[in-house]
Amino acid sequence: MYSGIIERFRKQLPVSKDTPVVSLKEGNTPLILSDCLSRIIGKGFEVYLKYEGLNPTGSFKDRGMTMAVSKAKEAASRVIICASTGNTSASAAAYAAKAGIKCVVLIPEGAIALGKLAQALIHGAKVLAVRGNFDQALSLVKEIAAKYSITLVNSLNPYRLEGQKTAAFEICEDLGRAPDFQCIPVGNAGNITAYWKGYKEYKQDGKIKSLPKMLGFQAQGAAPIVKGHPIKNPKTIATAIRIGNPASWRQAEAARDESRGLIDAVSDAEIISAYKLLASREGIFVEPASAASVAGLLKLAGRNYFRRARRQAPGAARIVCVLTGHGLKDPDRVIKVIKKPKVVKAELKAVLKEIGY
Ligand SMILES: *Cc1c(COP(=O)(O)O)cnc(C)c1O
């Protein structure tokens, strides 16, 4: 039986036989070949989608949270705390419920998707909506965790990134090698940092021979790393990456530079267009932030980035786009971008007419 990322990758993780494993059997998410995107990028390219929205609470945050909460429990901590744009709080609340410990979450008022708020509340977290943005909520929880014996489970908690790096391991196992490129949304920049760490560790262990180029994408209105300075009032419909001052800023730059990749920005319009394409052509429903990786892929393809890279290194190339969270997280967004169903009379004739028979 599949047992979650800690059991599967125990040797690569900072756990001992005494660590009480708190798991909802996260990880083991599918790597799906996208015919449509492979065709768009061109001959010789295979584009894969790592569908992290299929984790237990609907986002990759569960990989980090199983580690953070297990280690908190090992340290006999009775309360965990986080600031969140939504998915961290949903995940923390669920794992705290499973562990039987208390969870406090600070969210920016009015700026988190409905599904995530619902999750944090139903799992019994103490949820406080702060009159401010994510960055302000994060400084508050950092201060609280420093002063009291409460465990911070934001990605500043090193165990979070340890857990998250396992997604890179899974990709390597599925492909039998590392991808050539990896596209990934960047918010607080923990995930790009974690993947890069995972790939480097697998290479050090001799499990893979090459490393991917890391291609990170921020939303245009929340692109501090691209712009080179913090953004005071970050704006984007992709709330999971609406972050103006990423905690892992330097590490993300290191991942970019060491891999000779890039970090670029995509507009909300590009994000929505990728979001619709994934749903309508691939049958994969993601939340808007997740579509930033595919929006970025398409933006780079439009500039012939991949074809040029291929001229330098001929041969088949594998690209992985990380789809970080599930579409049901943000039902309001869907309703805003799709056509509402047409209302018809409860008559056979009326229905047949509408469906063209
Ligand atoms: C947290 C999150 C991100 C951003 O990840 P970082 O580690 O903060 O860069 C992107 N997409 C979704 C769905 C998320 O929950």
Image: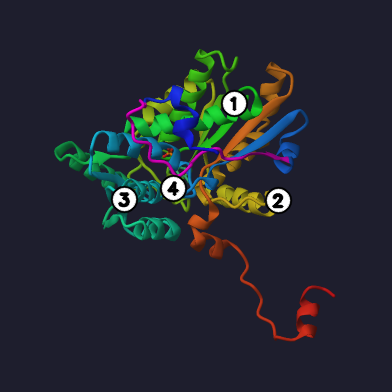
Outermost residue on the right side: it is: 357
Which is more toward the observer, 201 or 225? 201
Q: CA distance from mark 3 to mark 2?
A: 35 Å
- Helix, strand or loop for disc 1: helix
Left/right placement of residue 109 relative to residue 278 reads left
Q: Which residue is mark 4?
A: 240
Q: Which residue is mark 1?
A: 172
Residue 164 is at least partly visible in this image: no
Q: Which residues are magenta?
A: 15-34
Instruction: Check if mark 2's residue and mark 1's residue have beta carbons within 8 Å.
Output: no
Left/right placement of residue 181 relative to residue 13 reads right
Looking at the image, is mark 2 or mark 4 earlier in the sequence? Answer: 4
Q: CA distance from mark 3 to mark 1?
A: 36 Å
Q: Which residue is mark 3?
A: 133
User: Can you give x and y, in whole percent of width and height, for residue 270 in the image?
Assistant: 58, 47
Task: Name the quarter where the C terminus is drawn.
Answer: bottom right
In the rendering, which numbered label is found on residue 1?
none
Looking at the image, is mark 3 or mark 2 earlier in the sequence? Answer: 3
* Residues packed near mark 4 inside 10 Å, few (<14), some (14 to 19) or many (20 plus): many
Q: CA distance from mark 4 to mark 3?
A: 12 Å
The structure residue drawn at horizontal position 38% and vertical position 58%, both measured from the top left corner, is: 117
Disc 4 residue type? Answer: Ala
Give the overall secondary structure of the magenta segment: loop
Where residue 294 sits, quadrant-wise, is: top right
Q: Eyeballing the image, is 226 above or below 54?
A: above
Disc 2 residue type? Answer: Arg
The structure residue drawn at horizontal position 57% and vertical position 52%, both measured from the top left corner, is: 272
Disc 1 residue type? Answer: Cys
Q: CA distance from mark 4 to mark 1?
A: 26 Å
- Helix, strand or loop for disc 3: loop
